[in-house]
Amino acid sequence: MKKFLALVLSLAMVLSLAACGGNKAPAEDTKPAETDEPAPAEATQSIDLWVYPVGGWGQEDNVKALTDAFTAETGIEVKVEYLAYADGDDKVNTAITGKNQPDLIMEGPERLVANWGAKGYMVDLSDMLDDTDKSELIAAALTPCINAEGKMYEYPMCMTAHCMAVNLDAFKAAGADQYLDLENRTWSTENFKKAVAALYDHFGGTVAAVYCKGQGGDQGTRALINNMYGGAYTNADHTAYTWDDPKNVQAIEELLAMDGIAFDASLEGGDEIAKFYQGVLKMAFCWNSAQQINPNNANTGEGKTVTGEEIVYMNFPTPDGSPAELCGGIWGFGIFDKGDAARIDAAKQFIKFMCDSAHTKDAVSTSTFFPARTAAEGTDLSKVSDNVMLNEYAALMVPNMGDYYNVIKGWAAQRTEWWNMLQEIGNGADINETIAARMANANAAAQG
C-alpha cells in the first residue's frame, strides 16, 4: 500500500475546538453462583462495521485487505456495509430506531459526537487513551472527538483540510491563470471574480456551481462564502449560527450576480466533482487530497481530468489573498452501545488495530488522507510520504485548517437549512429574509 504522511500536521495544534455529546450505558454485570468474582465476558467472533466513503475506505477491495488482516490477528470477523452520504444518515437513524445499529461506524465528530453521541447512543472511548496516546494524537484531531464532559465518542484515525480546485489548462486558455498565486495556492476575492469573468467570456455558460441539491459536500459552499469576505459560520463558542454576518451576505449577493456562477439545485458535492473532472465545470469547491490523487475515483491519474487537463488545488479566495480558513475533515471510529460487553470489547480491538498499532500506517494510507497522530505503538507516522503531491498538499493546505465548528449542537438539522437556503436564494427569494428564516431554524436546533 502507498505510504502517506501527515506532514506539518503538528502546526494544526493551535486550533481551539469543542465538542458536545451524551452518555454511556453501563454494561450488564453477571456473576456465577459459586463465586463473588465477575464472570469474563464471552468472546465474540463477529462484529458489524458501517463505513461512510472516507477516501479509499469507501472501496471494498481496500477495506477487505485491512479487515482480513485484523481477522487473521484476532479471530474476529468484520462484516462491512458501505454507506453513501446521500442516504447514509437515514439508514443509520432507521437502524437505531429499530435497535439494529452496527457495532462500529466510521465517520467524523459532527455525526459521532455532536449527533449520535449527544443523543446517548455511543460508547465512551476515553478509557482507550493513555498518556502516550494523548502525546501522539494531534490536538486538532482529538479535541473535537471529546465532549465538554470528557466523554470520547470517536477515536480519530485520519484528517485532512478541504479546499477547492481549478482546471489549470482551462484557466490558461482563458487567460485567467494570471489571477492565481500558484506558489502558495492562494488568490484574492477580486482576482477570483476576475477569473470567473475571464472563464465566462472564453467558454460561456456555467464555469462554477454553488451546488445545493442536498447536504453532500456542503463544507465547500460554506468555506467559499465564509472566506470571500471573512465571515463566520458560527459564533466563537459554537452555540449559535451566524449566517447573517454582513460579510456572508455580501459574498452570497456577489456570487448570485456573477455571470458564470450558478446556484445549481441539481448538484451535490459529488456531482460537482464529476462535472469538474469531466471538464464541464472549470473549478470545484468540493475538493481534498483524496480527490487530487484520484479525481472522482476515475483512475485517470493524479491531478488530471478525464481529458488529461491539469487539476490544481487552491485555497478559497480571501479579501487580501492570504490563506483561507479551511474546513477540516477528521475521521475515525465510534462504537454504538448495544449493551453487549463482548461486542464492545471486540470493537475496541478493531479501533486499536486501525488507529494505534503497527497497522495504522496502512489504515491511514488507505484513506488517502493524513494520520491523526505522529506515531503509533513505535511506528513513526511523521516521515515524508513517497507521494510528492500529497506532501505538497499537506504543507500548503493542512496548516490552514480553521475552526472545527461542525460540533455545534443541531448540526445534522442545520445542514438541511443551509442547502435549502441556497436553493431558495438561487430561485429568486429575498436574500436577507431567506437567510434570517433558515438561520432561525438552525439556531432553534442548536438550542433544542
Image (cartoon, helix red, strand yellow):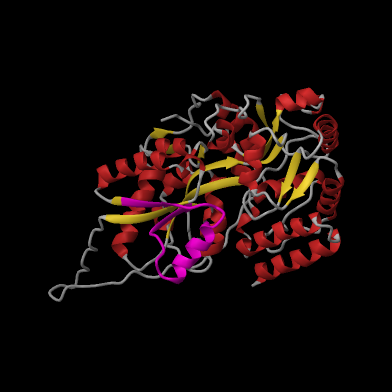
In depth, the one of 165 and 271 nearer the eye is: 271
Q: With respect to residue 119, does 228 lie above or below?
A: above
Quadrant housing residue 318: top right
Quadrant housing residue 353: top left
The residue at the point 28 percent across, 46 percent down is: 71
Expressed as whole percent of the image width and height from the top left, the position of residue 299 reads 52, 31
Name of the residue lying farthest toward the left: 34
The residue at the point 58 percent across, 58 percent down is: 19
Expressed as whole percent of the image width and height from the top left, the position of residue 429 reads 83, 61
| Quarter in which the N terminus is drawn | top left
The residue at the point 84 percent across, 31 percent down is: 198
In depth, the one of 389 and 375 nearer the eye is: 389
Left or right, 301 with reference to 261? left
Which stretch is magenta?
Answer: 78-106
Whether residue 68 can be seen here: yes
- How many numbered discs? 0
Expressed as whole percent of the image width and height from the top left, the position of residue 287 reads 63, 39
Whether residue 148 can be seen here: no
Magenta span has 91? yes
Expressed as whole percent of the image width and height from the top left, the position of residue 165 reads 68, 34
In depth, the one of 262 and 125 nearer the eye is: 262
